[in-house]
Amino acid sequence: MGENRPLLTKRDLIRTWLTWICWGQRNYNYERLQGLGFCHAMTNVIEKVYTDKKDIIQALTRHMDFFNTENTWGSVIVGISAAFEEQRAKNAEIDPSIISNVKTSLMGPMAGIGDSVTQGIVKTILLGIGIDFALQGNPIGPVLFVLLFSIYAAGLSYFMFFSGYRMGKNAVVSILSSDIARYFTDSLKIMSMMVIGGLAASNIKASTQLVFNFGGTTVEVQPLLDKILPGMLPFLFLLLSVYLLKKKGKSPTVVLLVLFVIGFLASFLGILS
């Protein structure tokens, strides 16, 4: 019965989660990256489950190893590690290297999911909403971004942490083997493309003043382009930016310089207004 009795209370786990989400990325270094932040979060668990000084030193040492992942989705690894440490405190036969191996094997996949979803999709959508408000002169834009992103990060990391703790090492396997993560990611990708398309159409200003005369007939190019595809020129500039960033691997600074040169020359020649 003693082995089934939990050593960690809900309060202990919440403290561990809060320490990770608030301080996990506060002390990067080239040797360990997030290792010190991970160890700092695990101190709440280690001090509670171990009483022998030798066990405490060994646990702190193994969690000082190199570690790097995305902070919100990576919370599941903190939860799994907390569950492992609790189980090892009950059963000293558990090999401590298992804890380190699980951390190492999971930090890459969770970073891949987290960076794609959090940085590439969610943050893009929320920034698009905030920037749109800001461009209209509404001060709620940056406030809304910070608020919504904080709710997302806190809610998701809380869910991932406690999922990891409850399901142990099988947590991530369950998540990755189901279709939920794929459906969620695909839905957010579609939404982010819609937001980016809307921002491009409403905020990229590009039109042409070109006029051609054919046998006494005047043809204005811009109304003709609008009939074919409204916002065609902004869309072409967006495609050019994506092409330079993704296909050619150019830096954002280079892309901005290219767009500046094109805009300057086209305006000087009277092609764009």
Image (cartoon, rainbow, N blue to C red):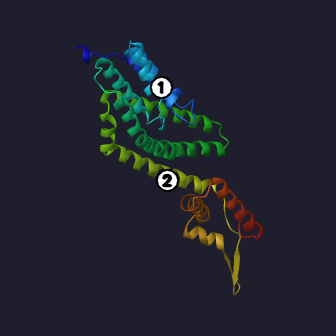
Q: Which residue extends farthest left? A: 1
Quadrant (top left, top right, bottom left, bottom right) of the C terminus: bottom right
Q: Amino acid at mark 1?
A: Cys
Measured as percent of width and height from the top left, residue 237 is found at: 61, 62
Q: Amino acid at mark 2?
A: Met
- SS type, badge 2: helix
**Front-most of residues 132 and 96:** 96
Tag 2 residue: 193
Callout 2 crowding tier (Cα within 10 Å): few <14, some 14–19, many ≥20: some
Question: Residue at 38% of width from left, 18% of height from top?
Answer: 10
Q: Which mark is residue 39?
A: 1
Q: Which mark is residue 6?
A: none
- SS type, badge 1: helix
Measured as percent of width and height from the top left, residue 99 is found at: 36, 30
Q: In this picture, is 84 found above or below 215?
A: above
Measured as percent of width and height from the top left, residue 50 is found at: 38, 15
Q: Which residue extends farthest front? A: 54
> Of circles 2 and 1, which is in front?
1
Callout 1 crowding tier (Cα within 10 Å): few <14, some 14–19, many ≥20: many
Q: Earlier in the sequence, mark 2 or mark 1?
A: 1
The answer to whether one can see residue 118 in this image is: yes
Quadrant (top left, top right, bottom left, bottom right) of the N terminus: top left
**Front-most of residues 255 and 66:** 66
The answer to whether one can see residue 11 in this image is: no
Q: CA distance from mark 2 to mark 1?
A: 38 Å
The number of numbered discs placed on residues in the rendered structure image is: 2
Q: Quadrant of residue 173?
A: top left
Q: In this picture, is 217 found above or below 267?
A: below
Q: Quadrant of residue 141?
A: top right
Question: Residue at 31% of width from left, 22% of height from top?
Answer: 87
Q: Is residue 224 left or right of residue 110?
A: right
Measured as percent of width and height from the top left, residue 225 is found at: 60, 70
